[in-house]
Amino acid sequence: MAIQALGYVGIEATSPEDWAGYGTQFLGLQLAERSAAQLAFRMDDRRQRILVSPGARDGARFFGWEVADAAALAAPAARLEATGLPVDRGDRVLAGQRRVADLVVTQDPLGNRVEILHGAEHTAEPFRPGRCISGFRTGALGMGHAVLTVPRMADVLPFYRDLLGFRVSDYVTNPFHAYFLHVNPRHHSLALIETGQAGLHHLMLELFNLDDVGQGYDLATLEEGRVATSLGRHTNDFMTSFYARTPGGFMVEYGWGGRQVDPATWQPVEMTSGPSLWGHDRQWGSAEMRAEARRLKLKAATDGERAPVQVLPGNHTLMQGECAWWDMMKAAE
């Protein structure tokens, strides 16, 4: 599998400064760069993971998908070119802006800018979150996942599955039509939801500690309209999460406890028990979809459906005094 992880995401914003506080004080990202051209956020030892730049609309500007090295970069580029899709080599200026060794640029069938890269820059400077959190679960799993809305599934799924080599984890047809795809042990790094429209539905960021998610939920409930989906747990990736509206209108899923799969042996299945085991009351979508999601959730409870107990590799326990640097920084303000 050539694509290894979601490396970074670029966001276009009509009010980019609104992202400064949202990204740091709510999500807990580190604002690593602030200029007229962009805001660059860190979430781990990478130089940057989320880039926000000013524009005429709100939404995604680009998605950076990571491969192992220069040789691995050539393979997806060749497959795309063989089908007649345009593929541009990123120049040194663009590579410097993205802080990568090299990249190629193309578009998916909906016009989403897809950047395939290798050699993302790391830094030895410790990650300093914008609020006291235990950190984000990234590494080989990538920065999280992205979920795109699509007008027709058949127009988009082959691009990611057949050309770029994403593998199907599972899919649902009720209460909406969606495919979940993996490129590493994270249950899905990309999902496609058929809604009749094209756009960015949400980005998912996974925390090391459930309490980080709960405290984030408390913060979100302080702002009218910030919570788009209540706290709950998914049936397929077992993520305990809530969804918060961003300054751009799309959502961020803020979660913990995501499932891992074995890409070598995993077999895709249709999920028939709905998207959530409990919670996740949605403030978006049609009334019919929300009602069906509630019905499926209550049926899962009646049937005794439960997520298995997991021991998550790489989990991190927040220790007393670990955020002392953060307390000192706030005291100095």
Image (cartoon, grey):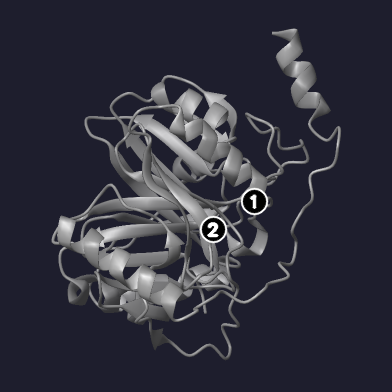
Residue 112 sits in which quadrant? bottom left
- In the rendering, at what x and y percent does residue 138 appear? 63, 56
Q: Which residue is mark 1?
A: 210
For label 1, the SS is helix
Q: Which residue is mark 2?
A: 240
Residue 240 sits in which quadrant? bottom right
Residue 144 numbered tag:
none
Residue 197 sits in which quadrant? bottom left
Of the pair 291 and 112, the residue shown nearer to us = 291
Badge 2: residue crowd in 10 Å (few <14, some 14–19, many ≥20): many
Badge 1: residue crowd in 10 Å (few <14, some 14–19, many ≥20): some
Total labels: the figure holds 2
Is residue 41 in view? yes
Residue depicted at 47% across the width and 29% down the height: 22
Residue depicted at 58% across the width and 43% down the height: 214
Of the pair 39 and 287, the residue shown nearer to us = 287
Picture layout, residue 281 above or below residue 140: above
Residue type pointed to by label 1: Leu
Residue 309 appears left or right of 149: right
